[in-house]
Image (cartoon, coloured by chain):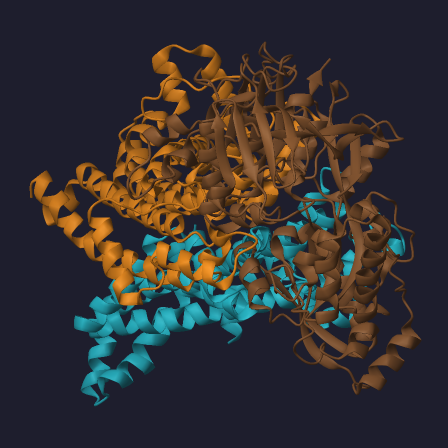
Chain colours: A brown, B orange, C cyan
Amino acid sequence: MAKVLRILGAALVAVAGLAGSARAQGRADTLLVVTELGPNSMDIHGVGTNRPAYQASWNLYDRLMTYGVKTLPNGSQMYDYTVLKPELAESWQVGADAITFRLRPDARFHDGTPVTARDVKWSFDRAVTVGGFPTFQMKAGSLEKPDQFEIVNDQTFRVRLLRKDKLTMPDLAVPVPIIINSELAKKHATSSDPWAMEWLKNNVAGGGAYRLEAWRPGQETIYARFDEWKSGPLPKIKRVLVREVPSSGNRRALLERGDADISFDLPPKDFAELAKAGKLTVISHPVENAFAYVGMNVKNPPFASLKVRQAVAAIIPYEKIFATAVYGRGVLLQGNPIASLTFGHEMLPAPFKTDLARAKTLMAEAGFPGGFETTLSFDQGFATINEPMAVLVQESLAQIGIRATIEKIPGANWRNMLLKKEMPIFLNAFGGWLNYPEYFFFWNFHGQNAVFNTSSYQNPEMDKLIDAARFETDKARYAELVRGFTKLMVSDVPRVPIYQPFLDIAMQKNVKGYQYWFHRQLDYRQLSKE
Amino acid sequence: MTFAKLAGRRLALALPGLVGVVVVTFLLNRALPGDPAAFFAGPAATPQAIAEIRIKLGLDRSLPQQFILYVRDLARGDLGKSLTTGQSVRADLLARLPASLELTLCSLALALAVALPLGILAATRPGSWVDHAARVVTTAGVSLPIFFTGLLLVYVFYYLLGWAPAPLGRLDAFTSPPPPVIGFYLVDSALAGDGVAFRASLHQLVLPAVTLGLFAMAPIARMTRAAMLGVLASDFVRTARAAGLAPRTVLFTYALRNALLPVVTLLGMVFSFLLGANVLVEKVFAWPGVGSYALEALIASDYAPVQGFVLTMASLYVLLNLAIDILYGLIDARVRIEG
Amino acid sequence: MSRRLRQVRYVVGENPVTLAAFSLFLAIVVLALAGPWIAPFDPLLSDTSRALQPPSRRHWFGTDQIGRDVLSRILVATRLDLAIALSAVAISFGLGSLAGACAGFFGGWTDRIVTRVTDTIMAFPLFVLAMAIVAALGNTLANIVIATAIINLPFYARMARAEANVRREMGFVEAARLAGNGQVGVLARHVFPNCLPPMMVQASLNLGWAILNAASLSFIGLGVRPPTPEWGIMVADGAAFIVSGEWWIALFPGLALMLAVFCFNLLGDGLRDLIDPRRRT
């Protein structure tokens, strides 16, 4: 007995003795970011690169230009999509059929070699040749062929335009067109791998504001400031540590106890509570050009019937979902006049509201008075919001006779399911990098049937409006076209928009300088710690 | 029967098990849902792009063909490449295995340190309240889902009390790892004389080791108790007592040594069980081991790491059992002679 | 029969812990049967205006994130969890003991095949195999049960094999054979029934393990589908709410789970004392 107590006592003392963490020096000029997932590649042009890799790329590599910054009425800062600022290019001239960039003469890569137009051409050629997402993204700005890119001299680079596209310039400042140290990369290229895809996956040949100090995939990524960076004001933070902590509860605990500096991906409930508690700084931005929705397949019955879709739009419990699944972290798109942050332009509020009687009538008119059976699918990777949302939608659908079984699709399979376009009804969200409504509609509703056209929506009328809007320069006519295709979406209701999500971020009170970016990743270059 | 012959015999017996493991792992992996080609083709992929990637990944070949390729690669020690980390699976596993092993061994040590005395205590006072209490306590430890225990411990000891360090992995954010020797931070930092790293890694080990260890306590305590009871009732112990030997001597020098044999056999099973439970603990404590590696790969339908992980765990288990069999043979002469 | 009863009473009486476990088991069975009727609220009905309420007089165990009553969900989940545990164990017990008994009794190729299969299954860390099977086949209830059954099979197979092996040479088997019974008849009528009692102990322990397995699968996203109430998935979902202070969502299902597993484990001990006093530990 005594022995037992002695053992237990010793154990307790040992545990208590280990208490009190050793806070090493260097805390003041290091930023500790905790995140759910880290990058799976250092090469944004690679196959299957995930979103956290965009953050790495953004900070480790330069691009020709970047966006300016604007301050919102509430004091927070975000990128200004109407202002392009010099980054690697110190100036440029927009001509009738070409844009000429002057590169900074003192720009260097991390290994000290000077940045020349040769590097820019090699990098751009790579972006439009490797295929997949990067090439698609370049194409969105009419950047399609290597022969568009010309070296005028060491410091001058020219882009020939295939057509007049207002998205060309903005597209040059998105994460994809990075400037790679071509000499260094070519040293590791082979005949079967001319673009050094293998080597650049794990190594960085960049000239961005930060160098890669260490990368342990699945654990952490460490960035160290590149003190010779010339493409902008030198960042204040010398070292950034990004640690992967899979459990969201632990991330919140770390922030609340002051053991971590910043975190993005917490459940909306946690952000709502942290914002209220006031011990941390919580900054929220509606994600531009984005909304979460209930999508329906318009090709196959029963959702091919317009009345059925309208019935669904009339039964979704909008406020309930917004309050319970999203905790108000967003902008409810139902009945609200949309602020100018959405779509960059004013959008018609979705006129849907919950009306059980009307929904039932519509179902009867559609020929389904007794309802039918179906499956409601969602991406398991976003289960925190999707699951309660799905349960609420399922309950509501049951009220008009639609008996839906819930199908949780694991993340890897979700892309595949979207591509197959057979899911009858599902939850999804889309956000576009370039803040133009026709950009959103092009990906989501155009007959070219991209993977994001999840409803398989085909309407030549819609295509005409979208195509015209893409190249329309007259402001009044453009606004009319935008109203036109938005109205069409509302009347055909291939999907029911529910809310525009917030991008929430929580940080210690002494972390300053955060700016919201369209790519929803952290730009370390603007941050500082007091 | 010589030691070498014994080892050889046991290894030969273990081989068919390994073959079975290879086949089953392959089949299970291919049955995993999700099309990795679609996943890696990226967000804006067209069906052609996906088909191209499928060919690049070698997924367009028939099943038997894929199996032959798989076995051939295996024979060369090539476990394939992870599509999520971009590294070779073997490199990934080698880098992450020490983390899992260190955690598992520490928790096993912890469990032994608590469960052995508990079992002995219960055996020397059978039927008393100590006996019942020991049984209740150890059984309670094994009755909660392991992830729940982990989360509760984090909540109480880190969040509420601040005694435990932040669940950030093997080291806190500002301590650098010791120069790698075998990958066990405790050993490596001790060898390098790095006190800071040693204390930091010990600190981070406490909670996850306790979580895992709680699970191992019950079977060990149970088996110790049962074995001790059996041995204490045996003839030779009675003789020793009758001969007037001190109770302590009887207990430790004679009884315990014999009682430990079945416990040693049990350790193999417990170790294997802990290897499996590792997956859950690593997720809760952000531990960069093979369990979390495989879990992330599973979610991404990344075949190779899952295959490599299962194969590695199973092989480890087979080898461990082999080691225990041999150990047993060394301890117990009867086994050697009959062997 | 009454001798058996007296023996039961003796064993149970001598060991208060076993008595407690027995009563708890009965309580669980009763709840499983009566659950849906005694639950105060509909376990699937959400009431978002009452979401995340702490335990109160109206909701004894509080409400979860979409306003469902936690107590009702726990009560109704009893049936599902018990069903999962019982079916998984029944399958592995049935198949395993049969295969093992045949292997031990007939020897030869049967023995070799059965041993190979069980060795292969046993080579995988248990949870990893369950994870892989459910991921491969899909996370339906049936697959979770099948996966749990498969990983537990080897225990029964080995035990049955050992028992059958021992009894093969025993006198009563000889006698049965001499009396004219065929091999299969001897196996079915004499050897097999005698193998069963020791395995009942293992079965009871496995009941607890089956429930924990389902809970762990839920934690990594491979558990039952929403909105089905099941203890494990309630704990897994509620885990995210611990840090923000809504402890009741995870704690109560966790306690229910712990009590049930606890009960099964202690029951196993009690059964062992009952069945084979020599092996009493």
User: Quick check: B40 left or right of A522?
Assistant: left
Q: Nearer the viewer, residue C121 or A227?
A: A227
Please provide percent x and percent y for residue C14. 55, 54
**Which quadrant would residue B181 be assigned to in this image?**
top left
User: Quick check: A229 left or right of B53?
Assistant: right
Is A435 rendered above or below residue A311? above
Q: Residue at x 26, y 64 (%)?
A: B65
Is C226 rendered above or below residue B212? below
**Which quadrant would residue A50 be assigned to in this image?**
top right
Q: Nearer the viewer, residue C195 or A520?
A: A520
Please provide percent x and percent y for residue C108. 16, 71
Q: Residue at x 31, y 35 (%)?
A: B255
State how many labels appear. 0
User: Quick check: A458 left or right of A272?
Assistant: left
Q: Quadrant of the C terminus of chain A?
A: top right
Q: Residue at x 63, y 13 (%)?
A: A29
Is B148 rendered above or below residue A233? below
